[in-house]
Amino acid sequence: MRAFLLSFFLLVCGTGLVFGEAVLPQSTPPPRPNEVIDFLSAMGFSPEFTGAVAAALTAGFNSGRATTTVTLLFLQDLAKIPREQAERGLEIIRFALSQGFIVDTGFAGSSMMNEARKLLALGRSWEEVERVLSLRLGFLLATRSVLARYAVISLSAIGPDVPLAASDRLVLELAWAVGDFILWEGGTLGDPRFLGYVQGRLDRLASVGVLSSALTGRTVAVLTPSILEEIVRLAFQPERR
Amino acid sequence: MPAEELELIHRSLNGDLEAWGEIVARYKQAVFAVTLSILRNYADAEDATQDAFIRAYENLRKYDLSRKFSTWLFTVAANVAKNALRKRRREREPPLPEPEGDPAEEVHQDIQLSAVRQAVAELPEGYRAPVILYYWHGLPLEEIAQVLGLPLGTVKTRLFRARSMIKMRLVEQGVIHDAVG
Amino acid sequence: MRWDELEELLRAAVRKEVEEGAGRLSGLEERVIREILRWPARKSWWTRAREFFAQPTPRWALAGVLAALLLGFALGRLTVSSPIPQWSSNLFVIAAPGARSVSVVGDFSAWQPIPLSDPDKDGIWMASIPLPPGRYEYAFLVDGKWVGQDPLAEEYLRTFGEYVSVRYVGGERAGLSS
């Protein structure tokens, strides 16, 4: 009887799946937030985890820290890997959102979800993707801490639903530039190119309007090689004695 | 397990509510810490603590005497708190807890301690519980994993991430200045 | 501050947090015992659930079928094409004589392939993609093979040893725009 019921359930699911696919137009507007949450809910995570991620994502969609389109694509990537691994990947995103970081800039560059999709397009394994996301999270946390310490940005409330400020994008782009230099450009601490690389990136982003010119100007003026090194050390060794 | 505790459990199993009251007295603060770590609100944690002891009593026959009693009890408490959290999430979102106490007195208290408390309060859901079980209860990581129903790796990651975040919050606020060296 | 000092502070902070609320636990023993005595025969959720589902209700069966259909429908909507934000057009061009298929992947498509075309069969494949101002990483896929160095890119980045091209859109040094 149980086997029959299960088969019937799967048959009905399959029917729904076929129709769901068939009615989908190939060029659609961005998915609605509830579609993303529905997809998340069908991924088989525990109700607690699903609820926590759904709350963070919904707040992120509302505040502009995540977009429904890239998030759905990211979730679809996660749906293809073992659940425990997917949960770890998604937990990094939830944690980042809970700390008020932008995790997805839509189709416009630096972000955790976009990075994950890039690495997958490059054929990298999920273990590598997870490792990189973890490092990116470290860079985000460290960048914000150091910028706040040097009073480049001020911090009051943090969270996924706090309205976005220009400094949020600055933190993201600076963290990304530092991360790119260390992770992908083979840069090391004490590398004479480091400061120029980061300043150049920020200036260029300001020139195309991604970053606020005034804030970028202030930041570029404050940055020194030792501040950048402090970010890297903090990102890699938060428990340093 | 201490013989005295074993006896209290045996008596409770035989319906001796006075013995169960003794168990409640011994563990109420520890169970409260578990529920508080998940619910982040004193009033809800108090209700969940009471409920946890009732649930534990009802299910006492399922307790395997070869296991550590506190771990089993904390697991029951964590489950009760998680259910309460789910229910609460359906109804309302709780405000982040503000540390209680007289603000004037706070000024004279250790600023570092207040900053750490605030940073702990700001930890995202799911991160406070491992921190409290580790720092308050002093539980080993394996037991924390058991109580919270999480894989050991997840507990390690969450503790590591929580500590990183707390340290970075302290750097942001200028409470500590030697993030680098 | 050394890390072990922070550990000690953490311990103290957590202790204080719990202790401040612990005053509420006074008399908890009595309250627990009173509650247990009040409902001596409370049924577990499992018992209640079994009793509930033991009563045959056709409406529940119908609801189950509908829920399964909806779940399947949701899963069916996995393939969501990426809408490209409407902005200035940017030309992506690559010479790939003899290639059977060429596409471009990048931030602007969340790394989903966007096909390039070669209508006059001269081996020059291109696509015009409208993009808002920003910094975009991208690469071409020529017959599935990663080609990360676009001569028209402003800079290159190496990721796990593979190149990706970088183009800034907008501003004075923007890449090819049409």
Image (tube, coloured by chain):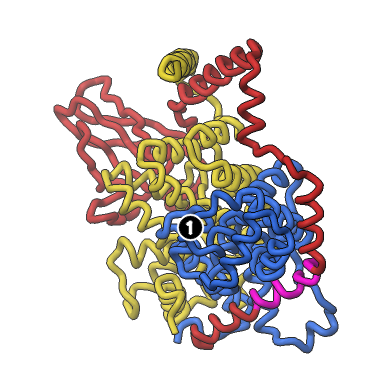
Chain colours: A yellow, B blue, C red
Answer with the quarter of the image where residue B37 lies. bottom right
Q: Position of residue C114 (x, y in %)?
A: 36, 31
Q: Position of residue B161 (x, y in %)?
A: 49, 65
> Who is closer to the viewer here, A28 or A239?
A239
Residue A210 appears in the picture as rendered: no
User: Which residue is the site of mark 1?
Assistant: B146
Q: Position of residue C131 (x, y in %)?
A: 48, 39
Instruction: Work out whether B128 lies above or below A75.
Output: below
Q: Residues within 10 Å of mark 1 (few under 14, many from 20)?
A: some
Answer with the quarter of the image where residue A55 lies. top right
A166 sits to left or right of C151: right
- The residue located at (53%, 20%) in the rendering is C68
Q: Is B66 within the magenta?
A: no
B70 sits to left or right of B143: right
Q: Amino acid at mark 1?
A: Gln
Residue at the outermost left position:
C98
Q: Position of residue A25 (x, y in %)?
A: 48, 17
SS at badge 1: helix
Instruction: Work out whether A231 lies above or below C158.
Output: below
Specify start and end residues of the magenta stretch as a single range. Answer: C13-25
Instruction: Please state the total of marks drawn on the protein image.
Output: 1
Position of the N terminus of chain A by quadrant: top left
Q: For the stretch drawn in magenta, what is the main secondary structure? A: helix
Answer with the quarter of the image where residue C11 lies. bottom right
